[in-house]
Amino acid sequence: MEGKGPQIHLAVFAGILATTGSLFGKVAGSFDIVPLIYLLPKICFLILMIGSNTAGCTFFVKALQGSESSLPATVASAATNYFCSALIGFLVFGESTSLMWWCGTSLILFGLLLICNTPVNESVSTIKRKQQ
């Protein structure tokens, strides 16, 4: 089995894909279907949303399978999705966020780093090796 680092990488990528899926869904919802010409872009964005979310779920499951614990993969994916969604909302849709919000998000990401870099208890590793 690979080390913890590559599994976190997959979880972060899953979070980015989940954000991308949300972006495609929001853009697809902004099209009115009154003129029939807007139906094609709406369908394309919906297909992109489904594809992005499916790929994100696939990477998340691979991150879970390669991790000794589900906690780092889950936290990494959720925090990445949260942060990237806010960033895209700010940059693409002009949503406003306060300095306090960004400070809180930074603390969440710092906590994520602490959780993901916590060494595994030696007795748990020994038990898992004996089971294999």
Image: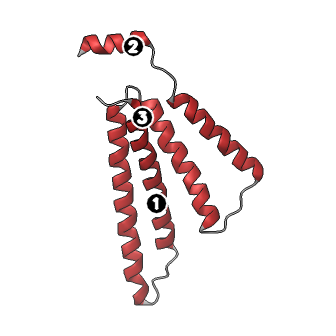
- The answer to which quarter of the image holds residue 9 is top left
Of pointers 2 and 1, the one earlier in the residue sequence: 1
What residue sits right under mark 1 in the picture? 20
Q: Where residue 7 appears, x then y in whole percent?
A: 38, 37
Instruction: Tell me the amino acid under the disc marked 1.
Output: Thr
Residue visible at 66% across and 68% down in the picture: 94
Helix, strand or loop status at disc 3: helix
Residue visible at 67% across and 64% down in the picture: 95
What residue sits right under mark 3 in the picture? 5
Q: How is the image coloured?
A: secondary structure
What residue sits right under mark 2 in the picture? 124
Q: Where residue 111 appears, x then y in whole percent?
A: 61, 33
Residue visible at 36% across and 61% down in the picture: 50
- The answer to which quarter of the image holds residue 124 is top left
In the rendered image of this protein, does residue 34 appear above or below residue 96?
below
The mark total stands at 3
